[in-house]
Image (cartoon, rainbow, N blue to C red):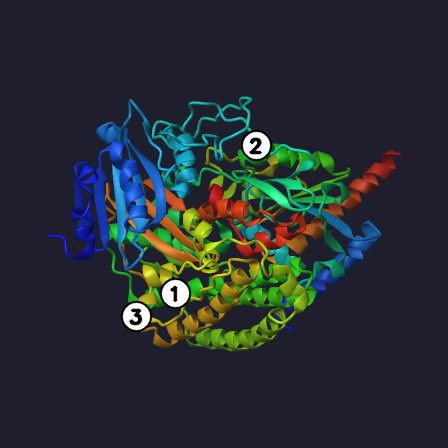
């Protein structure tokens, strides 16, 4: 087993413990490409290949935002993706976590001065977690999702205190 | 005197076209002809109909500051040999219209719509003047590619309409899909009209990831332009940035060191392998052959991590630079590539053995998503899609760059035009790529990695073609002061997207994903 794979195993175990603790089930993630160059998507897809196989750690990439605990957004948010992104967000049940993945989603990256681009996801949605990189490596995405789980946990705790 | 057949090409023009030629010149393999605007369409039709040339691009540049006109460039590749022809016409800034090429050359369709919304150049006689990317809320009369457009001023949103094609009749349903899809793929909208199971019409609407890359490039100094071109379409960033670098190098007359040429070849093929693995895995996945899909994805991941070990980037980013490359492959790198490739080839052989014999898979891919050779030719498709429909074109062989001229490889060719043929082309290309990398590493001479390129003269044109895993990409640069005055990018997907509308005709909707995978088109490369 290579060092990378070991990293993934250790990270994965931590992740599984955390998803079980916070959700008692797998965490459902909906990916939204809001104008990426597609390399970020390649990395998200890498996560589901049998080398990383994140489903065994309790991360499930789902087909519909209706099932999602978190949105994983890539790209600077192009003009033509503003409305679809907002609609996807609205379709996800609260408390929903928004993760901005990659330099573009964080700040617009290299595209931020384009006439048909915005400066990242936070212009439109409350962003909870940033995963830096261009594109972030698969390990970094797992780590970012771990942070998202922590946020979700504290949000849930906050919600139950209010009751 | 102009030598050879390129010269004859001008001499043999029918008199009516010959009389419209303003000037012509031949430089190396590149023939440039300026014609009066009223003869542009006729000249283009002649190039396709008589010379059997392939359309590479049709695009414009705003030179009103210089001579009061827009220039339209129509670029062709001759079917034999390395010849490139550019037909250029000036269109007066006060009357920005010209006769559309689309009635004669269908492949010009999207190019002209692109010029219309970018430059406000009206193609008269064009059958479909809907916007390509700037729809839904883009105000009319705002043309972002014109030089007087200020990209720092936000463009307001105004309500606009967009008419989809409608198919009407009893029992016909429309299925809209996207832009946000169920899988992790890029956004695009597909509108199917179905009569029962079979698709009787598909309309794709792209443009969701349109960013304005060509405009942005005009503001970026050349070295940053390399970075940008790596991000036009992330998974073929290496070959895109290579085309950009080569275009600039041709303007500067730079002499790229031999070693860098070989390295560029090896890296281009490494990029092709991981992408083709992804496509092959995708086809397996969509035909419910999960084991095969996972095998292919593991191989892809192995290539990505090999890329990282060798260059520090899984996507071979920051490797290309103007004048050569930044990353070398040393002895230990060579060893690790060879070892990885040997293992990869063995495992790939196992996978291919299964995929080409599995009846449940073959059932799904044979005769599915047919693109006839006639349609492929008329639509001017490129890359593996063209080669699966009997079109024998490959930029690496036909317009050699990097070190391809010195290496031997064959270009797989199939005629069936179905998903099976596209899968087979990709499978065979992986094997060719492995051999190309081995040859490149064996023959790579010692030497420098990068030539110093200091002087990129303004006002010149450089163009380069590279074969990405999706087919031929073009970068065309008109140089300005330290940055492009105009940078045209033509991703292979821009030519190939319209073909998917034809290929799904008569297929059932559940077969669309596998057809789409076999095409593997880039949305971001198309939308720019
Ligand atoms: S962050 Fe980088 S890899 Fe991700 S979409 Fe942006 S440019 Fe592409």
Chain identity of mark 3? B
Residue B101 tag number:
none
- Relative to B89, is B7 on the left or the right? left
Q: Cα distance, mark 2 to mark 3?
A: 57 Å
Q: Nearer the viewer, residue B442 or B52?
A: B52
Are the numbered discs 1 and 2 placed on the same chain, yes or no?
A: yes
Name above or below for residue B134 compared with residue B15: above
Q: Nearer the viewer, residue B260 or A153?
A: B260
- Relative to B417, is B254 on the left or the right? left
Residue B192, quarter of picture: top right
**Under 8 Å from ligand 1: the CB of mark 2?**
no
Residue B447 tag number:
3
Q: Are marks 1 and 2 in contact (CB under 8 Å)?
A: no
- Crowdedness near tag 2: few (<14), some (14–19) or many (≥20) residues, C-alpha within 10 Å: few
Which element type, helix, strand or loop, lies under badge 3?
loop
Which element type, helix, strand or loop, lies under badge 2?
loop
Residue B164 tag number:
2
- Which residue is depicted at the point 55% across and 28% down? B162
Mark 2 and mark 3 lie on one chain; the one further toward the N terminus is: 2
The residue mark sitting in front, 2 or 3, is: 2
Chain identity of mark 2? B
Are the numbered discs 3 and 1 placed on the same chain, yes or no?
A: yes
Residue extending furthest toward the front? B170
Q: Position of residue B462 (x, y in %)?
A: 28, 48
Q: Which residue is mark 1?
A: B265
Are the numbered discs 2 and 3 placed on the same chain, yes or no?
A: yes
Q: Are marks 2 and 3 in contact (CB under 8 Å)?
A: no
Q: Cα distance, mark 1 to mark 2?
A: 43 Å
């Amino acid at each position: 087993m290579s060092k990378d794979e070991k990293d993934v195993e250790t990270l994965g175990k931590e992740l599984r413990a955390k998803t079980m603790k916070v959700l008692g089930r797998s965490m459902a993630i909906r990916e939204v490409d809001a104008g990426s160059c597609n390399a970020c998507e390649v990395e998200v897809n890498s996560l589901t290949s049998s080398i990383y196989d994140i489903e065994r750690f309790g991360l499930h990439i789902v087909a519909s935002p209706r099932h999602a605990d978190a949105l994983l957004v890539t790209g600077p948010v192009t003009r033509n993706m503003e409305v679809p992104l907002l609609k996807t967000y609205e379709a996800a049940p609260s408390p929903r976590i928004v993760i901005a993945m990659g330099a573009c989603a964080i700040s617009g990256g290299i595209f931020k001065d384009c006439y048909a681009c915005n400066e990242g996801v936070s212009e439109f949605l409350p962003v909870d977690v940033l995963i830096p990189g261009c594109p972030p490596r698969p390990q970094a995405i797992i780590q970012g999702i771990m942070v998202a789980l922590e946020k979700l946990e504290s949000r849930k705790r906050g919600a139950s205190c209010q009751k | 005197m102009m030598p050879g057949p390129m010269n004859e090409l001008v001499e043999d023009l029918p008199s009516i076209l010959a009389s419209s030629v303003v000037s012509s010149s031949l430089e190396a393999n590149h023939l440039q002809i300026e014609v009066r605007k009223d003869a542009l369409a006729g000249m283009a039709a002649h190039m396709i109909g008589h010379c059997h040339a392939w359309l590479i691009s049709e695009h414009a540049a705003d030179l009103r500051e210089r001579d009061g006109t827009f220039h339209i460039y129509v670029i062709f590749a001759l079917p034999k040999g390395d010849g490139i022809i550019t037909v250029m016409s000036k269109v007066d800034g006060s009357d920005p219209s010209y006769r559309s090429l689309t009635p004669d050359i269908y492949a010009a369709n999207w190019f002209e719509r692109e010029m219309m919304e970018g430059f406000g150049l009206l193609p008269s006689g064009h059958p479909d003047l809907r916007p390509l990317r700037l729809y839904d809320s883009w105000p009319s009369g705002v043309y972002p590619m014109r030089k007087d457009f200020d990209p720092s001023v936000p463009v307001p949103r105004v309500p606009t309409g967009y008419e989809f094609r409608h198919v009407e009749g009893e029992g016909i349903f429309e299925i809209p899909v996207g832009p946000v899809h169920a899988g992790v793929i890029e956004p695009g909208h597909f509108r199917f009209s179905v009569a029962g199971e079979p698709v009787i019409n598909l309309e794709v609407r792209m443009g969701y990831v349109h960013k304005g890359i060509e405009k942005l490039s005009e503001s970026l100094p050349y070295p940053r332009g390399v970075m940008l071109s790596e991000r036009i379409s992330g998974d073929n960033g290496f070959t895109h940035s290579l085309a950009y670098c080569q275009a600039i190098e041709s303007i500067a007359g730079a002499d790229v060191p031999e070693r860098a040429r070989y390295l560029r070849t090896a890296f281009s093929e490494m990029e092709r392998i991981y992408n083709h693995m992804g496509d092959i895995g995708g086809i397996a996945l969509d035909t419910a052959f999960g084991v095969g899909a996972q095998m292919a994805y593991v191989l892809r991941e192995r290539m990505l991590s090999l890329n990282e070990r060798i260059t520090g980037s899984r996507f071979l980013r920051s490797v290309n630079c103007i004048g050569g490359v930044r990353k070398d492959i040393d002895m230990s790198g060579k060893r690790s590539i060879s070892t990885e490739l040997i293992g990869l080839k063995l495992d790939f052989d196992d996978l291919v053995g299964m995929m080409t014999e599995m009846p449940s898979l073959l059932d799904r891919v044979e005769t599915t998503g047919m693109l006839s050779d006639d349609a492929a030719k008329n639509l001017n498709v490129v890359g593996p899609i063209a080669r699966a429909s009997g079109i024998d074109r490959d930029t690496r062989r036909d317009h050699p760059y990097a070190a391809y001229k010195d290496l031997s490889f064959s270009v797989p060719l199939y005629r069936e035009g179905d998903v099976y043929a596209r899968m087979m082309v990709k499978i065979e290309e992986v094997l060719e790529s492995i051999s190309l990398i081995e040859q490149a590493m064996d023959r790579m001479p010692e030497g420098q990695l990068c030539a110093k390129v200091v002087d990129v003269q303004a006002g010149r044109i450089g163009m380069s073609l590279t074969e990405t895993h999706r087919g031929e990409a073009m970068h065309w640069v008109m140089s300005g002061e330290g940055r492009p005055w105009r940078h045209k990018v033509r991703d292979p997907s821009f030519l190939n997207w319209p073909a998917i509308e034809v290929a799904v005709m008569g297929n059932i909707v559940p077969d669309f994903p596998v057809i789409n995978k076999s095409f593997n088109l880039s949305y971001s490369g198309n939308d720019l």
